[in-house]
Every structure is written in structure tokens, then in C-alpha cells.
Image (cartoon, helix red, strand yellow):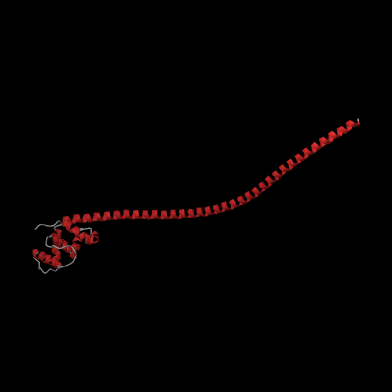
């Protein structure tokens, strides 16, 4: 009967009891673990080609029948009960595979170390990420504070500009009124100057007439 690869079988068990396996560093500990629970016994029996079911940790009819077949092969009473003698036979079966178990132990130890390494890397990356998040939050808070100050200053500047614009508009209206008054005064002065010039011209003409008349009178008396 063809034997099933031990590593493939154990790979199935890893999915259901990986964290239990990771704590065992030596072959003896692994053997003690395997023979002390149903899932471990199923692994051993599956490796011996006596168990055809899945590694589920349930002591069902297939598991019990496989135990009886194992007991028959080892000259034990085939009662399907894993007692002291049956466990001892299971341990002896595993001891024959000591080299595979040692390699498995080394592999589990390596996986454990790698897990610690990557876990430390992950924790460091997580801490760095949290640090960056806190820095971003602080920067966001600072940006909000600066934005609020800028908006408040901008509102104040807009208020000051409106007030200055009102003052300027009032002054401009006043100056425009003054300019309008000055223009009217200038127009009045120009008109008055023209009137005086005309009046002076008329008076000058009258004076010329009076002078001619005077000269005529004086000439006739001579």
C-alpha cells in the first residue's frame, strides 16, 4: 500500500492547529502533541494509509475503524480505544520518522521566526503609519487654523476697504460739489468781466464824443 507524503498530511493539519504546532520546538513535543488529540492521531493514521477521512479532529466511525486496523497491525486489542499501549505504539511509529519530524520542527521554528520578523516589520510599519497619520492630523489642524485666521483677516480687510471706499466716495462728492461751485463762479466772473469790458468800451466811446465836442467848443472860441 502506497504511503502518503507526510508533509502533505501535516499541511492539512496546519490549517486547523497551526498555532498549537508553532509552540512545539522539538520532535518529542510534536509526538506528544500528535498522540494526545484526535486530529494528531488522524494525521498518523492517514500517513500509515489506514485512515481515509479528513483531518477534522472528530472521533467518528472512520477514525475508530482506522485505530482498530492500527491496533491489529501492532498486535494490540482492536477495541478502537486509544489507551496507554496504543499511544506508545503511535509514538514508536512516529519515532521511526524522527528525521522527518526533525525537519518539520526546523521548518516550524523557521516559520515562527519569520512570523516574528514580519510581525515586527508590520508593527513598525503600523507605528510609522500612525505617526504619519498624527503628523497629517497636526498639519491639517494647523492648516485649518491658518485658513481661519486668513479668512478672518480677509473679512476685516474687506470691511476696512468698504469703509475707506465710503470715506473716499463722500470726499469725492464734496470735492465734486466744490468743483461745480468753482466752475459756476468762473462762469460768473467771465460773464461779469465781459460785461465790464463792454461797459468800459461804451464809456470810452462816450468820452471820445465828449472830447470831440469839447475840442469843437474850444476851437470856436479861439
Q: Nearer the viewer, residue 178 or 96?
A: 178
Query: Residue at position x 23%, y 60% from top?
Result: 18
Q: Nearer the viewer, residue 106 or 4?
A: 4
Residue lying farthest top?
222
Residue lying farthest front?
220
Quadrant location, the N terminus: bottom left
Q: Find residue 130 and report its horizontal and vertical position in percent.
A: 38, 55
Residue lying farthest right?
222
Quadrant location, the C terminus: top right
> From what the image shows, is residue 145 above or below residue 80?
above
Q: Find residue 174 and report its horizontal and vertical position in percent.
A: 65, 50
Query: Residue at position x 58%, y 51% from top?
Result: 165
Q: Where on the picture, by quarter, is residue 156?
A: bottom right
Q: Where on the picture, by quarter, is residue 135?
A: bottom left
Q: Is residue 160 left or right of residue 78?
A: right
Residue 33 seen in render: yes
Query: Residue at position x 19%, y 59% from top?
Result: 12
Q: Find residue 179 and report its horizontal and vertical position in percent.
A: 66, 46
Q: Is residue 200 left or right of residue 128?
A: right
Q: Nearer the viewer, residue 179 or 131?
A: 179
Q: Nearer the viewer, residue 212 or 10?
A: 212
Q: Where on the picture, by quarter, is residue 108?
A: bottom left
Residue 85 seen in render: no
Mark count = 0
Q: Is residue 21 left or right of residue 182?
A: left
Q: Find residue 209 and report its horizontal and vertical position in percent.
A: 82, 35
Amino acid at each position: 500500500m502506497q504511503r502518503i507524503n507526510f508533509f502533505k498530511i501535516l499541511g492539512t493539519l496546519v490549517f486547523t492547529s497551526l498555532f498549537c504546532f508553532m509552540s512545539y520546538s522539538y520532535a518529542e513535543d510534536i509526538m506528544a502533541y500528535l498522540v494526545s488529540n484526535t486530529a494528531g492521531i488522524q494525521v498518523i493514521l492517514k500517513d500509515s494509509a489506514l485512515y481515509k477521512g479528513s483531518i477534522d479532529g472528530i472521533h467518528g466511525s472512520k477514525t475508530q475503524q482506522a485505530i482498530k486496523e492500527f491496533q491489529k497491525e501492532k498486535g494490540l486489542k482492536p477495541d478502537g480505544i486509544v489507551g496507554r499501549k496504543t499511544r506508545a505504539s503511535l509514538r514508536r511509529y512516529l519515532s521511526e520518522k524522527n528525521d522527518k519530524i526533525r525537519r518539520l520542527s526546523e521548518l516550524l521554528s523557521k516559520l515562527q521566526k519569520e512570523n516574528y520578523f514580519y510581525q515586527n516589520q508590520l508593527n513598525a510599519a503600523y507605528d510609522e503609519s500612525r505617526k504619519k497619520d498624527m503628523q497629517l492630523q497636526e498639519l491639517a489642524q494647523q492648516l485649518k487654523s491658518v485658513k481661519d485666521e486668513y479668512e478672518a483677516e480677509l473679512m476685516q480687510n474687506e470691511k476696512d476697504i468698504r469703509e475707506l471706499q465710503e470715506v473716499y466716495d463722500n470726499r469725492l462728492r464734496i470735492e465734486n460739489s466744490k468743483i461745480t461751485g468753482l466752475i459756476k463762479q468762473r462762469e460768473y466772473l467771465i460773464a461779469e468781466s465781459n460785461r465790464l469790458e463792454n461797459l468800459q468800451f461804451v464809456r470810452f466811446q462816450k468820452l471820445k464824443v465828449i472830447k470831440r465836442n469839447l475840442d469843437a467848443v474850444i476851437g470856436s472860441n479861439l
